[in-house]
Amino acid sequence: MNGDSVGRLMEIVLQMKINLVHVTETLQQQTYEIRDQLGIIFEKEKSALDDCLHGIDDKLTECSVYVEDYKRLYAELASMRDKLVQLGAEPSSLPAALPADQLEGVVAWRLQELRAQGKI
């Protein structure tokens, strides 16, 4: 090989090195941008999940109020039914009593009932 060929080959290798550095920098920048975008999307999805949990919490709190109302109304209705029986009347049957005193048991029972009815 002569000097011109070696010089030309060295220029080609140098240009390849410059191109490779440029490609590497571009890839690193794109990786950084993608990582940032994924982080933003992750935080949005995380926030959406938090909102879902808060919604579930709100519904469970609301449900606990309804369970307490049901217990109170059921007791009043049972008492009224007993008085009607004492007065000689034949009152209709009572609605279903709650099978559990704890909210967890009531919710589990209602879930089973709704599944059995094909509603969930």
Image (cartoon, rainbow, N blue to C red):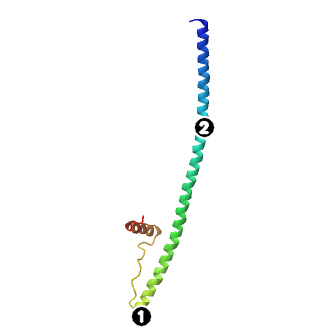
User: Callout 2 environment at 10 Å: few (<14), some (14 to 19), or many (20+)?
Assistant: few
Residue behind mark 1: 87
Q: Which type of secondary structure does the marked residue at label 2 adopt?
A: helix
Residue 110 position, x and y percent, is 43, 69
Residue 97 position, x and y percent, is 41, 77
Q: Quadrant of the N terminus?
A: top right
* Comes first in the chain, label 2 or label 1: 2
51 left or right, relative to 118? right
Residue at x 56% of width, y 58% of height: 51
Residue 59's tag is none
Of tags 2 and 1, which is closer to the observer?
2
Q: Quadrant of the C terminus?
A: bottom left
Residue at x 38% of width, y 90% of height: 90
Q: Which type of secondary structure does the marked residue at label 1 adopt?
A: loop
Q: Is residue 5 above or below residue 55?
A: above
Corner quadrant of residue 93: bottom left
Q: Nearer the viewer, residue 82 or 115?
A: 115
Residue behind mark 2: 32
Q: Is residue 65 above or below residue 48?
A: below
